[in-house]
Amino acid sequence: MNAIVLSAIWGVVMMFSGLFTSNKNIVRAVAIFGMALLFTVNLLDIYNVHLFKVNVHEMLVFENFGLLFNAVAFGATLVYFLLSGRDFEKVGNHFAEYFALIFFISCGISLVTSYNTLLMLFLGIEIISIPLYILTGSDKRNLKSNEASLKYLLMGAFSTGLMLMGIALIYGAKGSFFLHAISLGNEAINPLMGAGMLLLLFSMSFKVSAAPFHFWTPDVYDGAPTVFTSYMATVVKGAGFIAFIRLFQTGFGSMHPHWQLAVAIITASTLLFGNITAVFQQSVKRMLAYSSIAQAGFMLLAIVSLSQKGNEGLFFYTAAYSLATIGIFAVLLKMKDYTFEGFNGLAKRQPVLAATTTIFLLSLAGIPGTAGFMGKLYMLSAAVENGKVMWLVILAVLCAVISVYYYFRVIQAMYLRESQDATEIEVSPVFKGLLIATAVGIILLGLFPQWLIDTLYFFTI
Amino acid sequence: MGQLLCLLTALAFPLIFIATWNTTYPNANRFYAFMLLSQAGLMGVFLATDALLFYFFWELALIPAYFLCSTWGGEKRIAVTFKFFIYTFLGSLLMLVALIYIYFQTPGDHSFALKSFYELSLKPDQQSWLFWMLFIAFAIKMPLFPFHTWQPDTYEQSPTATTMVLSGIMVKMGVFAVIRWLAPIVPGGLWGWGDTVAFLSMVGMIYASLLAMQQDDMKRLIAYSSIAHIGLMNLAIFSTTNAGMQGVMIQMFNHGINIIGMWIVVEIIERKYHTRKMSELGGLAQKAPGLAILFVVIALANVALPLTNAFIGEFLMFTGVFTSNVSQFNYIYTVVAGISIILSAIYTLNMIQKVFFGNTNSVTAAATDIRPNEKWVLAVIVVLIIVLGVYPQPILNLTEGTVNSILSKMITKHP
């Protein structure tokens, strides 16, 4: 509860901060402070210190898993603010509002990690989506940004429609919005219930950009200002997955055998589509958009297998993937040329940037010793343990091999090819330090994954 | 077995460094850092008794090799090492899935420990597909026909010091892994698919030998000859006899030493004359007698002449294959393996003849003999070749226990 209230308050604070001061450094400092505060009060919640007492009539349930996911999301956002906060000002004049919108999204994230009724799920998803439509179109004079925003809005509205329809059908079948009520009595499948569940499956797949509902993703990610793509592709996507797994575990868990195959097919097509299309991209930004679809395919394995290991894995995978992707985007923002050729010879010009990007890419590719490997290991273990989807595991592994191809293309460009232009890329020592810290974090998580996983069991509420 | 291969690794790296002392690399500090990192990975692979740790080191050995080849290699290096990396990575991920699957089959609180893997008795159909998932990873590393296509290109393009590591030690990872991580865990798959794999090994041996005969580039010739030798080792493992396994053990060590010796000679020749083409060389024996004597001994070991170390290994492997009772085709395998040895004599002696004898030409006219450090390294290798050729008992004693325990584990799981 702490996080929900505070993020909403801080969003308003951020909006006014733009009114009272035009000094961008102060605004950014306020935002960073706010995110750190949000992170802290969320931890306080875990330690049983509740700053706000609100009777939510059981519509929200605060569990370890959700709260710790909040911690991961806020932590990642904090890293994101620190690394890319300066690049907000390049997007447009409404500097403070961008921060405010991200705080509102954080509010939505804390809702979708703790909802107990479908109404709250809907509310949370909408609170996340609407600021995102604005952020996507925030580069007002850029036609591509406007197009992306409109596309996102239309497609998003469509999927929201599907979701509402699904919720309505489920309400018709069960007479309740509560997840525990929905989960009862599903031994024989009811047509209303089945249709509602399918519609919810589709709309959630849309939100996490799973194929074949992914068509908006490359255009939106490519059109949106790069600094916001970074946020959308990581924290927001992770939150979508938490909502997804919460719904299918608590709500539809008893129907697992019925929908497992459908989700497995969605997973398989996401993996195939994301990885194969990413291979053909010429722009690193677009490649990352497709790679985020591919990574979503891996995260979907947790929903297919629906187990303890899957939950741990999703939690860990989100953290690992977010850190690495935020890092790469932060480097990408410093580049003038987003094509693979733009990265040529980066190792000579900026050795620190190149080395850290290499670690991020290795983590995304899932090379042992990095956090990404542990994430993939958990996901594969979960799916193998389930035992019914071995074909999917083999497919996922083959796709992981394909992913090496496009991630390593960047590494090759940085280290093995010579650069044509000699323009300097200016980065501050602080930025470099933060990048190194992120990279070290990724390696440490890869070597000691229990540091993060154990938090899931260590705290009790 | 782990001890033996660690000994090989620990012995090989100093020899490689001393032998390539005079080669200069841009960013030499990074070059040596990656070399030593790959040594750490290799040692880890040979020592790990936990499946996950084994996988970790397996990859750790691969990553530095990728960077070594792609940064300091020849002009086609980027594409070639990429192929190498993707190939091996595909294999390792399949292996990872198989290891995870076996992990979930272990009783109680699941365990990745090698011991609990050994105690496990899997169903025949599980063994059958687990066998392929593991074996593809190891076969790519070895490399076994038809998974070998990355190998000649990578060997050719890599800096020679890295090629020595790749062929001297890293290919042994595959052989080693089959013995430790495949045979005792899924023996059913091993027996069931034994003939298929043996057939592939046979095809690989003959095919690689024939290709080696066609090569003009010394590096490619040695690369193909390595495929042929590894094919024989694989055949011997699948014979599952005591003699065959012992032969593989000693041959892993011997092949490591011998092939590093061969590469050192290639490296010396390339650095001095800026060519590896046999057709452009000739008459080196007159100009560099020291090099010629040492190289001839190493090359004869490559042909497995009696009194050299490889003879012991190959003799034991032949005995193993011949007396094996797991397949009814063992006579055919022995004959084909024999033919590959004859072919290896043809291409090796042909190489000696073209490079060291005949008339000198413009490239080799101004040749001088080798430097002391190179001479000493080659001398150490030659001494090892002859000592182990005459008295291999210490190594055989060292590996006897392992061989017996692995064979007994396999037999207890025999249906």
Image: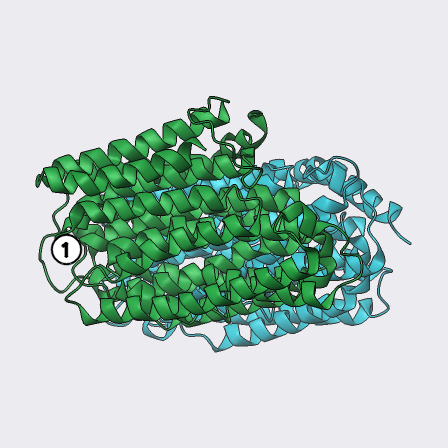
Chain colours: A green, B cyan
Which element carries disc 1, helix, strand or loop?
A: loop
Residue B312 can be seen in this image: no
In the figure, is residue A308 to the left or right of B115?
Answer: left
Query: Please, is residue A446 above or below residue A132 in the view?
Result: above
Rendered residue at 37%/70% (across/down): A154
Percent coordinates x, y for residue B373 in the rendering: 34, 42
Query: Please, is residue A167 above or below residue A191 in the view?
Result: above
Quarter of the figure that contains the N terminus of chain A: top left
Q: Residue furthest right?
A: B415
Q: Nearer the viewer, residue A296 or A29?
A: A29
Residue assigned mark 1? A92
Q: Nearer the viewer, residue A421 or A35?
A: A35
Percent coordinates x, y for residue A261 in the rendering: 68, 65
* Residues packed near mark 1 inside 10 Å, few (<14), some (14 to 19) or many (20 plus): some
Rendered residue at 46%/24% (across/down): A50
In the figure, is residue A138 to the left or right of B350?
Answer: left
Give the amino acid type for the residue marked by disc 1 in the picture: Gly
Residue A193 can be seen in this image: yes
In the figure, is residue A394 to the left or right of B348?
Answer: right
In the figure, is residue A58 to the left or right of A289?
Answer: right
* Chain of the residue under the numbered disc 1 shown in the image: A
Query: Please, is residue B94 above or below residue B113 in the view?
Result: below
Percent coordinates x, y for residue A403 in the rendering: 45, 62
Rendered residue at 24%/68% (across/down): A146
In which image quadrant can residue A392 be found?
Answer: bottom right
Query: Please, is residue A460 above or below residue A102 in the view?
Result: above
